[in-house]
Image (cartoon, rainbow, N blue to C red):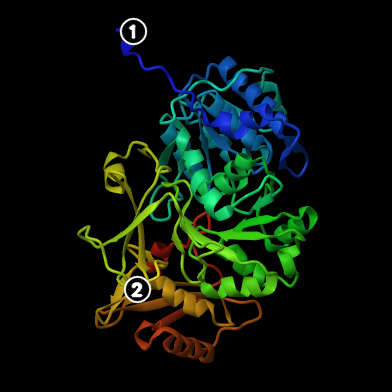
Amino acid sequence: MNNMVRTPISGNAADFFLDRHCREGRGDKTAFIGPERHLTYAGLLAGTQAFAAGLKQAGIKRESRIALLMLDDVDFPIAFWGAIRAGVIPIPINTLLPPDLVTYILADCRAELLVVSPSLLPDLDAALASLPDLTRIITADAELAAFMQPDTAPPVATHPDEVAFWLYSSGSTNMPKGVRHVHSSLRATVTTYAETVLKLRSDDVVYSAAKMFFAYGLGNAMTFPMAVGATTILLPHRPTPAAVLALMEAHNPSVFCGVPTLYAALLQHPGLGSGAGSARLRRCISAGEALPEAIGTAWRRTVGVDILDGIGSTEMLHIFLSNSDHALRYGTSGVAVPGYELRLVDGQGADTPDGEPGELLVKGQSAAEGYWNLRDKTRSTFVGAWTHTGDKYIRDADGFYRYCGRTDDMFKVSGIWVSPFEVEGALASHDAVLEAAVVGREDQDGLTKPRAFLVLKQGIMPSAALTDELKAFVKQKIGPWKYPRWIDIVDDLPKTATGKIQRYKLRQWN
């Protein structure tokens, strides 16, 4: 019977992303630059070994779960990779979530240990006492240093298909879902998007405004630079336009990773210029929401570097559809990233022809194993080798994919499908508009028409004349049936903590 026991395959992701560099002589290379201290690859290796030893001493067993509620600083990769090398499952939590959602995630995943940045702990103190599975809380300061134990052990032998870490979905329309990823998923995103689109080099310095607690930032700021032995700059706090530009000028990153709302805000900052303050900037990317064409062209004109926009998901771990150096068309999400297959299907699951909207399905090796404790949702999202994204797209004759909106965001006007994103893009190209969101609303006859919510640029005052001008502008730009019948000027739009517009909330507004 002993011959029936399967021997573990050495597939621990920590070996490829970290230990390998030290074996091959790159230990002295700077891996992370934090606001107060730098961390070399050798220093990171020692830190992860010590954290793994601390977990063992604390009785945290392999495949147990720990939570990381941590700002982007050098302690984050120490805890994340330290857990993975020990075979313990780290679960990064969005630091911008309100306490009730943080508590929900901690209860849902049943984490035994929480590592938390000191500034985030006071708001949670009372709620944490109600979690029976959470037996230990460590602040990322002197407590973390005391928890760690010197050790030189290699990563535990894990199977490539063994669960390595969880991420929680952003919860744009419901409660966050625990998404379980295996060890091999991390490297799969490297051999696809990172190598074929991002094309990082070992001498690159990367700054990701998107934080490491969610999939886009985890790849940009950690796994992609670490795959090639590059360097990452970390900013623990909110990436305001002023803070981003100051960081760009101080550290001269060669690669900048942002989201559409940040690019739009930076374009309004008077300090934005060539290279966005960096003398070395060569690559900009965007994800999280589709990038309006007007933002992309304005950024290229002002900064001198194109933005490569793409789409990814927590379920697929990173970007699988993207623009690239050799295939760039603003207003689209680009083409399939090499290593991924895409389909557009109608409501019956049949492939849709070019020019017709359909739900985007993707197949690739970075797909998650499934959701935690949500079997029905897992079965409807992960169907065989294909993952349902819930995003509506149109593919043109050249193979470029144009975003239409989430499946439940689309609506028909006069029997014709209308893409909220297309109307939003038209509105955002007007000189007065900073941000736009569009939803369907029934008129007095029960017919659905577009309703727009706008954030105006600084110094622009709302008026009836401006409203009429915007309606005429959309009619002329994309078609008379697509113009918004109602326009609401608001101070800001409801968004998830990762910057996605929550259109379901706008549909509920009177």
User: Residue 353 vs residue 141: left or right?
Assistant: left
Q: Position of residue 164 (x, y in %)?
A: 47, 32
Residue name at image x 52 percent, y 92 percent: 465
Give the alpha-carbon distance from disc 2 to disc 1, as whole Å. Answer: 63 Å
- Label 2: state its secondary structure: strand
Does the rendering let one see residue 510?
Answer: no
Residue name at image x 42 percent, y 67 percent: 400
Q: Position of residue 99 (x, y in %)?
A: 53, 44
Mark 1: few, some, or many residues within 10 Å (few <14, many ≥20)? few
Viewer-side residue, 96 vs 212: 212
Residue type, mark 1 in image: Asn
Viewer-side residue, 173 vs 197: 197
Q: Quadrant of residue 408?
A: bottom left
Between discs 2 and 1, the one toward the N terminus = 1
Residue name at image x 45 percent, y 80 percent: 487
Mark 2: few, some, or many residues within 10 Å (few <14, many ≥20)? many
Q: Position of residue 132 (x, y in %)?
A: 46, 26
Residue type, mark 2 in image: Gly
Q: Which residue carries the number 1 mark?
A: 2
Residue name at image x 73 percent, y 36 percent: 39
Q: Position of residue 199 (x, y in %)?
A: 59, 52
Q: Quadrant of residue 16?
A: top right
In the rendering, which numbered label is found on residue 102?
none
Does the rendering let one see residue 225?
Answer: yes
Q: Which residue carries the number 2 mark?
A: 440
Viewer-side residue, 437 vs 12: 12
Point out the frontmost of discs 2 and 1.
Answer: 1
Residue placed furthest toward the top:
1
